[in-house]
Image: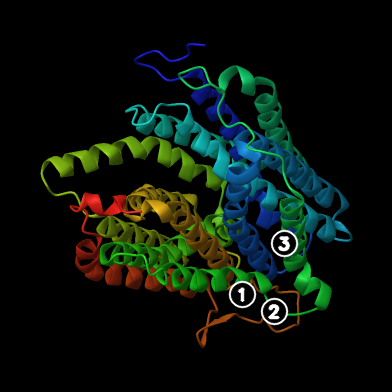
């Protein structure tokens, strides 16, 4: 079956684009309303809702390690995507049920929904991207543009999902996310044989072999473990956050395990150390950036003037700014880096990442200006929040695409999957950290209540207002940007990118 013209792309690319777009619609639609749902329907405190948000988004980045392993060994891409899509559809439906029941019994249903979403994402996320590459012969020059088109699908789904899911009651918002996932899954099942074919006419992403008992127990054990960790605080009335220990512990163990490999050459060891150092700084970037779905959504809901022509815009709509800005600005950044490269002025990967951190700090400077001295009942113009999201998107375009590219270039071939997994682990830690930071947002005092307000503390400092809260991010990301910029020359030497032959050693 001939599907590829010499100039164009295989139809399978647009099929995967469509499948991923609806899956991202589901994920970002749910994420846009998640923290508002916990605080308004389940009546949770901001602190508890923020911690749960961080646990959920952190584990979403962790389970692709399990899903990728089982796919490579047993399931193959197609079966993994179907299992993942089915679990995520169930998860979104549980969120719909949770919102329908409300505070009385909705929390337990929510835990079941989050567990299904986390495990399902682990099967779905790493496999659909892999199949994009499988559509093309090795070394095909169209692969880079194929991933650019695919990335647009991700951002298109992320753009319109908050507009749809945020415009209705929470339960219908979750049901819309569920329908999005069902559309993605059904279309994949029906049309996979027709479109998922290589240039030579071979079907791609087929199952590897039957799942053995050991691996089925691994899946069941993972589901039980995640459900237990999400429920632990409620079950045992404990303040211990098991998920934090699990994620941060893995971040400490992985570098020790990888660097203890005695077969590593000096250059390989140096490059791996660079990846770990940059992964550490990435935690600060995403920890600040991912406030979009947490504290910044609460800020948009409570203290941002969202009125347009007499109608109040839902707070979740702000989460459509970032994907739209990515679609509009990504080509400009590509032109910028190309122009700087021609003039031999293009910054190195570590310097680009330092610029990304600095831009996140600048975004928080922009929002800190209007909130200084802001009263509990006062609101700021939405233009301030729009400006923050656009500046943060510019920071994302300096850092996010660079990170994945850098890991693939610097990791020794025999450790490439493990190193990519470690990079995703840093994203998991960053999202968990984002939840922890969001929990520091000061509560809005209730004039009718006689109970004294308990303000959160960070490193011995009490945070009593939004200005102090946003200053925390300015200081954290600003210092991280400065340190990374100072270290960048040393890191460039350790990377030794001119020595291309070193990565071939296996």
Q: Does residue 11 lie above or below 88 as drawn?
A: above
**Which label number is shown at residue 240?**
2
Give the SS element for disc 2: loop
Q: Nearer the viewer, mark 3 or mark 2?
A: 3
At horizontal 35% and vertical 48% (from top left) the residue drawn is 405
56 displayed left or right of 131: right
Q: Nearer the viewer, residue 175 or 147?
A: 147
Can you identify the residue that label 3 sits on? 226
**Is 11 on the left or on the right of 181, as rendered?**
left
Marks 1/2: CA–CA distance:
9 Å
Q: How many numbered circles does the render carry?
A: 3
Q: List x then y, in percent, for residue 292.
A: 53, 55
Q: Estimate the spatial distance between the alpha carbons at disc 3 and disc 1, rounded to whole Å.
A: 13 Å
* Residue marked by disc 1: 245
For residue 378, above or below residue 165 = below
Task: Identify the image quadrant of residue 457.
Answer: bottom right
Mark yes or no: residue 173 visible: no
> If you read the primary sequence from the N terminus, does the residue marked by circle 1 or circle 2 appear first?
2
Look at the picture and state if 356 lies above or below 24. below
Tag 1–tag 2 contact (CB < 8 Å): yes
Of the numbered discs 3 and 1, the one sitting upstream in the chain is 3
- Characterize the local packing of mark 1: few (<14), some (14-19) or many (20 or more) Cα atoms within 10 angstroms: few
Q: Residues within 10 Å of mark 3 (few under 14, many from 20)?
A: many
The residue depicted at 59 percent of the width and 60 percent of the height is 58
């Amino acid at each position: 079956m001939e599907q590829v013209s010499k100039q164009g792309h295989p139809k399978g690319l647009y099929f995967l684009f469509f499948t991923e777009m609806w899956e991202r619609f589901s994920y970002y639609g749910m994420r846009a309303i998640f923290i508002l749902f916990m605080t308004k329907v389940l009546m949770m405190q901001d602190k508890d809702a923020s911690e749960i948000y961080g646990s959920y988004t952190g584990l979403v980045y962790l389970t692709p390690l399990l899903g990728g392993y089982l796919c490579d060994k047993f399931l193959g891409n197609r079966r993994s995507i179907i299992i993942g899509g089915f679990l995520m559809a169930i998860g979104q439906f549980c969120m719909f049920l949770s919102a329908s029941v409300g505070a009385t019994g909705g929390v337990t249903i929510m835990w079941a929904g989050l567990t299904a979403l986390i495990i399902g994402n682990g099967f779905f996320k790493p496999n659909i991207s892999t199949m994009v590459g499988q559509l093309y012969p090795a070394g095909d020059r169209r692969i880079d543009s194929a991933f650019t088109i695919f990335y647009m699908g991700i951002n298109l789904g992320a753009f319109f999902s908050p507009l749809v899911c945020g415009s209705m009651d929470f339960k219908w918002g979750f049901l819309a996310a569920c329908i999005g996932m069902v559309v993605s899954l059904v279309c994949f099942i029906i049309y996979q044989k027709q479109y998922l074919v290589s240039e030579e006419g071979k079907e791609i992403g087929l199952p590897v072999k039957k799942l053995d008992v050991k691996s089925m127990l691994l899946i069941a054990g993972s589901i039980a473990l995640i459900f237990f960790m999400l429920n632990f605080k409620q079950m045992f009335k404990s303040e211990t956050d098991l998920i934090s220990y699990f994620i941060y512990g893995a971040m400490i163990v992985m570098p020790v395990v990888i660097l203890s490999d005695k077969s590593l050459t000096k250059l390989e060891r140096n490059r791996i150390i660079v990846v770990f150092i940059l992964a550490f700084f990435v935690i600060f970037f995403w920890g600040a950036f991912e406030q979009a779905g947490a504290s910044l959504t609460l800020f948009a809901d409570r203290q941002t003037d969202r009125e347009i022509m007499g109608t109040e815009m839902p707070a979740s709509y702000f989460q459509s700014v970032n994907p739209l800005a990515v679609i509009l600005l990504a080509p400009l950044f590509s032109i910028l880096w190309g122009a700087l490269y021609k003039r031999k002025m293009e910054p190195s990967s570590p310097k680009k990442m330092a610029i990304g951190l600095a831009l996140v700090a600048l975004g928080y400077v922009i929002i800190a200006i209007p909130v200084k001295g802001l009263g509990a009942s006062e609101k700021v113009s939405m233009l301030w929040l729009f400006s923050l999201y656009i500046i943060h998107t510019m920071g994302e375009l300096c850092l996010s695409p660079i990170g994945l590219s850098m890991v693939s270039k610097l990791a020794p071939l025999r450790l490439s999957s493990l190193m990519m997994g470690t990079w995703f682990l840093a994203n998991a830690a960053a999202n968990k950290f984002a939840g922890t930071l969001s929990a520091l947002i000061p509560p809005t005092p209730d004039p009718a209540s006689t109970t004294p307000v308990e303000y959160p503390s960070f490193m011995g400092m009490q945070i009593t207002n939004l200005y102090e809260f946003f200053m925390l991010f300015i200081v954290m990301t600003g210092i991280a940007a400065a340190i990374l910029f100072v270290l960048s020359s040393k890191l460039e030497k350790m990377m030794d990118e001119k020595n291309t032959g070193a990565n071939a050693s296996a």
